[in-house]
Amino acid sequence: MRRPRAGLDAKSVEQMKPLLNTKNNQRGFTLFELLIAVLVLAVGLLGLATMQAQGLKSNSSAEKRTEATFLAMDIMDRMRASPNAVAAGSYNVDMGAVPNDPGCGLGCNAAQRPAQDLYDWAFAISDQLGGGVDNTWRAQIAQRGGVYMVTLMWDDERTGATGTDCSGNPNPPDLDMTCFQTLFQP
């Protein structure tokens, strides 16, 4: 015995005709929808690029602050190694440029050591923290009683800042450099 063939009756075919007619039932994106999708994607990518740029800027700033910390520790160690020169005030400085090289290097005597230390330190500051618009930086070592304050300043934003108030004022005309200060007792 044969089974009857499955098929569509005339009523089912008539019901499906509107579904098969593509003019009445279009599916898919229009050009306008596609443009909106591209616009949303572009805004998202622009936001991502902005976040990436801000992250790079923050990393650079953190790197400079870390370098300033190491440079401050460097001069503090040099001062601890020369207590007589510290007592004589040989390390009390306020400089914004690398001083002349005393030329004694590792062979300095006790009288020459502070000048060589300050030269080496200033050269390292210029190399590691300088680089702003005119290689602007400043270094100060000031005695306050038996305690010394080491202050390092640099143009972190590279805007030509020259202010030395350590206020962090980012507004012209008194652009202050970024400051790192630490106290220590030799």
Image: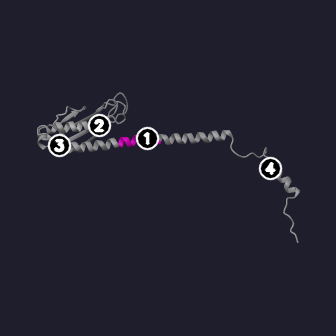
Image quadrant assignment for residue 157: top left
Crowding at label 1, few (<14), some or many (≥20) Cα neighbours within 10 Å?
Answer: few
Which is more foreground, mark 1 or mark 4?
Answer: 4
Which is more foreground, mark 1 or mark 2?
Answer: 2
User: In the visual, does 40 lie left or right of 86?
Assistant: right
Tell me if label 1 and label 2 are in contact, CB under 8 Å. no
- Whichever of labels 4 and 2 marks the residue nearer the N terminus, that label is 4
User: How far is the residue under mark 1 from the one under mark 2?
Assistant: 24 Å
Q: Element at badge 2?
A: helix
- Residue picked out by circle 4: 20
Q: Residue furthest bottom?
A: 1
User: How far is the residue under mark 4 from the one under mark 2?
Assistant: 76 Å
User: In the visual, does 175 lie left or right of 34?
Assistant: left
Amino acid beneath label 4: Leu
Crowding at label 3, few (<14), some or many (≥20) Cα neighbours within 10 Å?
Answer: many
- Residue picked out by circle 1: 54
Tell me if label 3 and label 4 are in contact, CB under 8 Å. no
- Residue picked out by circle 2: 127
Q: Which residues are magenta?
A: 51-62
Tell me if label 1 and label 4 are in contact, CB under 8 Å. no
Which is more foreground, mark 4 or mark 2?
Answer: 2
